[in-house]
Image (cartoon, rainbow, N blue to C red):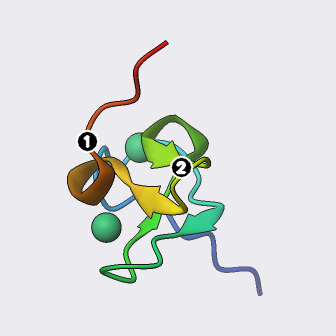
Amino acid sequence: MSVETVCEICAQRKAQNTCDQCGRVVCEHHYNAADGRCEKCAGPRTL
Ligand SMILES: [Zn+2]
Ligand SMILES: [Zn+2]
């Protein structure tokens, strides 16, 4: 039995990261790796 956690922001992609601030599990797309936080906490990443 496998449980796949989905991103708590988009609810579509598979979540692979946990926000250091709020503890949300988020997908790569909504995780700011430089900050270690989700997009909600760290803001959209600037490319
Ligand atoms: Zn996402
Ligand atoms: Zn967060």
Where residue 11 appears, x then y in whole percent? 34, 51
Residue 26 rendering spot, x and y as whole percentages: 46, 58
Q: Which mark is residue 27?
A: 2
Relative to residue 8, is residue 13 drawn left or right? right
Q: Amino acid at mark 2?
A: Cys
Q: Which residue is mark 1?
A: 43
- Disc count in the image? 2
* Label 1: few (<14), some (14–19) or many (≥20) C-alpha neighbours in 10 Å: few
- Residue 8 lies left or right of residue 20; in this view the side is left
- With respect to residue 16, does 31 lie above or below? above
Determine the residue positioned at 32% across, 47% down.
39
Q: Residue at x 30, y 32 (%)?
A: 44
> Along the line of sight, which residue is nearer the eye, 31 or 9?
31
Rendering quarter of residue 21:
bottom left
Q: Nearer the viewer, residue 22 or 8?
A: 22
Residue 45 vs 34, above or below: the answer is: above
Q: Position of residue 17 (x, y in %)?
A: 61, 64
Q: Which SS class for mark 2?
A: loop
Q: Is residue 39 above or below residue 44?
A: below
- SS for tag 1? loop
Residue type marked 1: Gly
Q: Residue at x 31, y 44 (%)?
A: 10
Looking at this view, is 10 or 44 the one in front?
44
- Residue found 62% across the figure and 69% down from its top: 4
Label 2 lies in ligand 1 vicinity (Cβ under 8 Å): yes
Quadrant of ligand 2 in image: bottom left
